[in-house]
């Protein structure tokens, strides 16, 4: 196992931990002789280990141990899975202390079951109560420090029980982020579900080496890729040494792989895949994983993403935030990243600032062009051209027309910018353009040149949009608005579904201790279904009305008859409030799913409008040339 060497617990290894730093060596030796070393594997429950009948105090020497709570009191398996109904309500890490006395008090039928589980391979030093009490009695200073540490750990545990933090903590512990050093996320308000990241990975490597959105929480989707585990179980499981660390600390799979799939089975996150290939006229299999495009100048998925939604962060940066406390800065779980989005890496802040400066300069330049065109047409003596002519001492008349001079050239330049918007769809299809820049850069340029082109054409039209030739100008703005609005709405709906799920889980956790699980789950069956198939626009209004009426009738019945066996009036009111909020969230999710289904066709609306725009622009340009020829 990943921690077999940790069986050799010595006085020196204990002294390296802060909790034992002030304890003399004879006392450490006495503690070690009166204690039992326990090895806890990943996802293994503490109750599955052999232990003495008396209560012990467990010091965490290495690894992370989580607290698992099963409210329904089911018989716990020896190892927990991701889909286990148990909730992870806290954790202990290196140097923490907890009691295993709860294992001596088995609950009755249907009562909550509490246990501890290894989030990573962990080593525990289980000291008997009499042995620990004897040492604490002889060393008062260490006893005081230990009690202070226990009180600080208890306060930290209680501070994580706010519903939002509790949900983030459960997600963090359930999916093994305690042993991860890297997380790759996509922001749902930017993700277009285009799947270009996976397609680019498959094109570069022959097959996709990750899943785009394996886990979702709030506004974020977490990809299934190598998380660079601290203990690296896959590396130690390979018997033929086909896995090795490179100079960057990345695990690489060499051609020595025999396809035994041991590494894939040992990966706790399922990030190693087995793919088939043909060698020596035989079909074999080998292990592959995301190695972050080692050996390439860039990463295929990041380069192909059109909106720049992909980010890589450390689990600490993603799941926690620093909070000042009386004993220094402490890190608490936080849902800010999942509710409000993740800020870009500090390394990208300069790039982000540069983009803001460029955007500001472009807006100012377009405003200056529009102001000059307006002044030349309405107040020519106050225009920039008049000031320049006066400074040169020339008395030429000033006029503004879309058919000649400044206005004419604005038309040419604006039309050229609109034609440049075609480079974005061509970029995905032409091999030459694919090598130039990332997809997100092309989309940004596509949006900007469309906006600049529409603005310049509006100035070219001398602000006269009441004639038929103004249709081409208005069509440009319709196309620009359709692209920007469609992208904005899809992002909001996409992230809104995640936020609704986040709020639902937070509601369940906040009401669990009061309402319980079984009664609301039975009552919710007569309310809006949780997973109802999304409908199209033709039936959305009817379905929305039906959901509202059904939920109103169901809650009305529950208020006066359905909860008659609950004697406490306050509890009935809390259960009704929970059911009402839960039904509202189910309806919201159903509506958002329907809206997402409709918005998937928005891209075709944008394309059709673009074709109409270029057709009208072509007619307008042809008419202009014919008129000038006559």
Image (cartoon, rainbow, N blue to C red):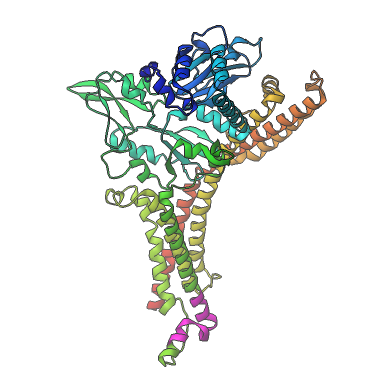
Query: What is the tally of numbered marks visible in this picture?
Result: 0
Examine the rendering and report whether any part of residue 444 can be seen.
yes
Position of residue 588 measured from the top left corner of the image (x, y, whole percent): 63, 37
Q: Is residue 196 left or right of residue 382?
A: left
Toward the viewer: 104 or 276?
104
Q: Which residue is pictured at 38% across the width and 61% down the height?
A: 419
Q: Is residue 486 left or right of residue 249?
A: right
Q: Which residue is pictured at 82% across the width and 25% down the height?
A: 569
Question: Eyeballing the image, is 301 above or below 149?
Answer: below
Q: Is residue 244 magenta?
A: no
Q: Is residue 325 left or right of residue 81?
A: right
Position of residue 400 measured from the top left corner of the image (x, y, whole percent): 47, 80
Q: Is residue 553 left or right of residue 316?
A: right
Q: Which residues are magenta?
A: 371-388
Position of residue 4 measured from the top left corner of the image (x, y, whole percent): 36, 17
- Classified by dominant secondary structure, the portion drawn in magenta counts as helix
Residue at the outermost top position: 53
- In which quadrant is the C terminus drawn? bottom left
Displayed quadrant of residue 586: top right
Toward the viewer: 47 or 324?
324
- In which quadrant is the N terminus drawn? top left
Q: Is residue 377 magenta?
A: yes
Displayed quadrant of residue 551: top right
Examine the rendering and report whether any part of residue 622 can be seen.
no
Toward the viewer: 278 or 332?
332
Q: Which residue is pictured at 28% across the width and 49% down the height?
A: 435
């Amino acid at each position: 196992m990943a921690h077999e060497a940790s069986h050799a617990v010595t006085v020196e290894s204990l002294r390296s931990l802060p909790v034992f730093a002030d304890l003399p060596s004879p006392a450490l030796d006495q503690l070690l002789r009166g204690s039992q070393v326990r090895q806890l594997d990943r996802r293994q429950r503490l109750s599955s280990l052999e232990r003495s009948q008396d209560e012990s105090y467990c010091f965490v020497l290495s690894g992370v141990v989580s607290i698992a709570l099963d409210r329904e009191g089911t018989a716990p398996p020896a190892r927990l899975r991701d889909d286990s109904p148990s909730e992870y309500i806290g954790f202990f890490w290196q140097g923490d202390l907890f009691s295993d006395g709860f294992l001596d008090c088995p609950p009755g039928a249907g009562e909550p079951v509490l246990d501890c589980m290894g989030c990573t391979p962990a080593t525990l030093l289980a000291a008997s109560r009499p042995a620990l009490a004897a040492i604490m009695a002889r060393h008062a200073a260490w006893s005081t420090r230990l009690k202070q540490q226990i009180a600080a750990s208890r306060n930290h545990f209680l501070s994580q029980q706010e519903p939002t933090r509790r949900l983030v903590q459960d997600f963090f512990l359930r999916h093994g982020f305690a042993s991860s050093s890297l997380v790759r996320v996509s922001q749902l308000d930017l993700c277009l579900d285009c799947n270009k990241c996976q397609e680019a990975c498959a094109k570069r490597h022959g097959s996709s080496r990750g899943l785009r959105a394996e886990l979702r929480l709030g506004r974020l989707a977490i990809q299934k890729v190598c998380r660079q585990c601290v203990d690296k179980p896959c590396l130690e499981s390979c018997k033929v040494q086909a896995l090795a660390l490179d100079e960057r600390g990345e695990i690489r799979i060499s051609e020595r792989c025999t396809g035994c799939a041991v590494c894939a089975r040992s990966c706790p996150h399922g990030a190693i895949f087995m793919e088939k290939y043909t060698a020596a006229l035989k079909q074999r299999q080998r292990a592959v994983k995301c190695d972050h495009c080692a050996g390439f100048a860039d990463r295929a998925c990041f380069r192909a993403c059109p909106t720049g939604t992909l980010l890589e962060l450390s689990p600490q940066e993603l799941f926690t935030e620093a909070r000042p406390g009386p004993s220094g800065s402490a890190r608490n779980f936080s849902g800010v990243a999942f509710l409000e989005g993740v800020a870009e890496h500090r390394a990208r802040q300069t790039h982000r600032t540069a983009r803001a400066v460029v955007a500001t300069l472009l807006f100012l330049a377009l405003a200056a062009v529009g102001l000059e065109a307006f002044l030349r047409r309405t107040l020519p003596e106050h225009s920039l051209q008049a000031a320049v002519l006066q400074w040169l001492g020339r008395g030429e008349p000033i006029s503004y027309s879309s058919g000649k001079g400044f206005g004419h050239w604005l038309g040419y330049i604006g039309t050229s910018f609109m034609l440049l918007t075609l480079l974005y769809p061509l970029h995905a299809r032409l091999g030459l353009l694919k090598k130039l820049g990332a997809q997100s850069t092309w989309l940004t340029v596509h949006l900007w040149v469309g906006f600049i082109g529409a603005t310049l054409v509006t100035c070219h039209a001398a602000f006269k949009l009441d004639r038929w030739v103004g249709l081409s100008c208005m069509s440009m703005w319709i196309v620009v608005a359709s692209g920007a609005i469609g992208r904005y709405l899809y992002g909001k709906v996409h992230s809104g579904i995640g936020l609704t799920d986040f709020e639902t889980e937070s509601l369940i956790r906040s009401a669990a201790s009061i309402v319980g699980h079984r009664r609301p789950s039975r009552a919710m069956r007569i309310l809006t279904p949780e997973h109802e198939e999304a409908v199209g626009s033709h039936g959305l209004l009817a379905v929305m009305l039906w959901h509202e009426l059904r939920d109103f009738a169901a809650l009305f019945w529950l208020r006066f008859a359905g909860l008659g066996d609950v004697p406490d009036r306050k509890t009935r009111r809390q259960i009704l409030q929970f059911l009402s909020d839960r039904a509202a969230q189910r309806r919201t999710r159903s509506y958002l799913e329907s809206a997402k289904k409709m918005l998937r066709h928005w891209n075709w609306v944008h394309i059709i409008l673009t074709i109409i725009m270029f057709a009208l622009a072509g007619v307008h340009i042809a008419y202009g040339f014919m008129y000038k020829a006559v």
